[in-house]
Amino acid sequence: MTIHVNSIINNPFIVAEILIAGKLHQNNYMKKVKYLSLAVIGMMLTVISFAQTTEDLIAKHIEAIGGRENWKKVNSMRSEATLSTQGIEVPIIITQVHNVGMKQEFSVMGMSGYSIIGVDGGWNFNPMQGQTKPEPITQDELNIGKEQLDIQGELLDYKMKGHSVQLLNSEDVDGTLCLKLKLTRKSGRESFILIDPKTFYIVRTVTNIIVNGQENESTVSLSNYQKLPEGIVVPFTIENNQLPAPINFSKIEVNPKIDDAVFKVQQ
């Protein structure tokens, strides 16, 4: 006779049946309870160990890139970079204020364009695509863009931000077996984060994004990490499968004074 714990709790007559069945059945039952208890305890220890491993990994990553204290001091950034493709160098300037706005400016063959993400809206202006004035982005693009306004990093204080993180099986990245995290944002949108087990730097992220109204998988590789005078460590080379060439940073300023008006659309 197979006895289930839930059945015992919900039906007291089964308990009486076990007692009447005699000592042999009672011993068998006790063994089953013992094994079940050990299994439950083992599962609980596994869950606790798993959670600690996830938290330890995130803590090691944050420490590797400069530590929580240094990153919490970062309120704004201005970066200069270039993207070189087909013999053409495209200069890029990225201006960011934490949880306020981000502006990306670029220039190609004498024509300049920009994209803006702010808490109130977002716009694109790309004369290379025939645009003559800034155009608003879609709501889906704006929602995704707003998630990039957290320049201190989504893993830092992720629980307070309403995100959740799960540790998955390791995955190979260019010959290195990397630790893999699944980040589920407060919005429900997911990203997969690959971390080098030696440096604890993020080397790759995989996220679904909206491009021209279509959902695409964005794979971003990060390398050439350098330590800034403020103590934080950031990648100076970024490759994105949505772009024709890597972006190489030449200068990154931390906490420059930035007027919020820079995130207003220029008509």
Image (cartoon, grey):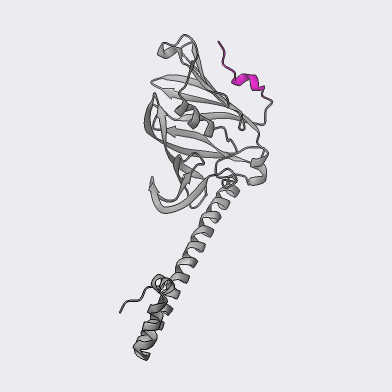
Examine the structure image and report whether residue 34 is included in the region drawn in magenta.
no
Residue with the most extreme top position: 132
Along the viewing direction, whichever of 218 and 18 lies nearer the viewer: 18
**129 to the left or right of 49:** left
**235 to the left or right of 76:** left
Magenta segment: 258-267
In which quadrant will I find the C terminus? top right
Observer able to see residue 231: no
Counting from the top left corner in percent of width and height, residue 28 is at 36, 84
Observer able to see residue 262: yes
Up the image or down, 11 lies above or below 215; here it is below
Along the viewing direction, whichever of 159 and 251 lies nearer the viewer: 159
Residue sitting at 45 percent across and 39 percent down? 189
Residue sitting at 37 percent across and 32 percent down? 216
**41 to the left or right of 71:** left
Counting from the top left corner in percent of width and height, residue 142 is at 49, 27
Up the image or down, 29 lies above or below 56; here it is below
Along the viewing direction, whichever of 250 and 73 lies nearer the viewer: 73
Residue with the most extreme front position: 13
The mark tally for this picture is 0
Residue sitting at 55 percent across and 56 percent down? 56
Counting from the top left corner in percent of width and height, residue 141 is at 46, 27
